[in-house]
Amino acid sequence: MNGAPDILARIAAGRRAQVEAGKSRLPLPEMRRRAAARPLQGGFARAVTRVSAVAPPRVIAELKPASPSSGRLREPFDPRALAAELAAAGAAALSVLTEPDHFQAGPENLDRARQGAPGTPLLRKDFLVDEWQIWESRLLGADAVLLIAALLPGGELARLLDAAGEAGLEALVEVADAGELSRAVAAGAQIIGVNSRDLRDFSVDLTRAVALSRHLPGGAVRVAESGVKGSADLLRLAAAGYDAVLAGTVLMRAPSPGDMLARWLRELAAGTGAA
């Protein structure tokens, strides 16, 4: 991805440096050994797949304290309490940010979210560029990981998909255009997310997900990411064929994220949508 300012490139550079520091403390073979000892829960893809074309979309609620474009979203930020609240409100899965520099999140958020919602699948939302991070994700208690196609050129995407499979984790592969989608399909992605946010400058356009939906393969689990403001957007994305929608910023800004999510789901069940 080219462009200035390229926020994604800056975040990725920071994560690569942090991974190298992490490897010096805990080399990959030892990380793999420790991670393999942690029991797997799984079930992410099953949880976020619609049972039929007329069923409401599933909601992946995102736990994030801040974002590069919006600054601090929630204070105080309590992953355990938020996970419990959103799971009780009907979230099919939880996406948990763990990137420290730009999202003010940390790896401990996964464990805290698991404490709050022990039966809900957890997606580690981060900028993964190395196999070490895949095994770290299992050690932290994730059920699935996010792989961003724009960060993983050439054979890197397929390599990390294979690593996720070896670690027993599912992978949500994020794409932003037709070229990235083709690479994701060729790499064997089974869960594909289309991000309506441009990661170069963090601008959002929901029509990106709608337009790209008709090119998604029929056998994939389809996830629309970013830009959701209400149940009307959920209905629009469901009509475009998405199984699930990932929503974060609007929920984190709400006085009660659980109340907001429960209202969306009631409106979806009634067949109506509100902005």
Image: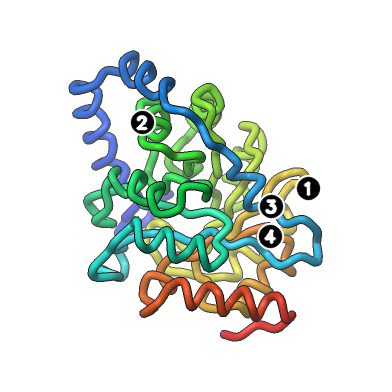
Q: Is residue 206 left or right of residue 5?
A: right
Residue 76: % across, % down: 23, 68
Q: Which residue is mark 3?
A: 49
For the residues carrying marks 4 and 2, which lies nearer the camera in this image?
A: 2
Residue 240: % across, % down: 72, 66
**How many residues crowd mark 4 within 10 Å: few (<14), some (14–19), many (20+)?**
many
- Three-letter code, disc 1: Gly
Q: Is residue 224 above or below residue 190?
A: below
- Could you tell which of marks 3 and 4 lies nearer the N-terminus? 3
Q: Which residue is mark 2?
A: 136
Residue 236 seen from this side: yes
Q: Are marks 3 and 4 in contact (CB under 8 Å)?
A: no
- Three-letter code, disc 4: Tyr
- Could you tell which of marks 3 and 2 lies nearer the N-terminus? 3
- Three-letter code, disc 3: Thr
For the residues carrying marks 1 and 2, which lies nearer the camera in this image?
A: 2
- Could you tell which of marks 1 and 3 lies nearer the N-terminus? 3
Q: Residue furthest top?
A: 29
**How many residues crowd mark 3 within 10 Å: few (<14), some (14–19), many (20+)?**
many
Q: Is residue 151 left or right of residue 265?
A: left
Q: Is residue 11 above or below residue 24?
A: below
Q: Which residue is mark 1?
A: 218
Query: How far apart are the two marked residues, 1 and 2, measured between alpha carbons?
Result: 31 Å
Q: Are marks 1 and 2 in contact (CB under 8 Å)?
A: no
- Could you tell which of marks 1 and 4 lies nearer the N-terminus? 1
Q: Which residue is mark 4?
A: 242
Q: How is the image coloured?
A: rainbow
Query: How far apart are the two marked residues, 1 and 3, measured between alpha carbons?
Result: 13 Å
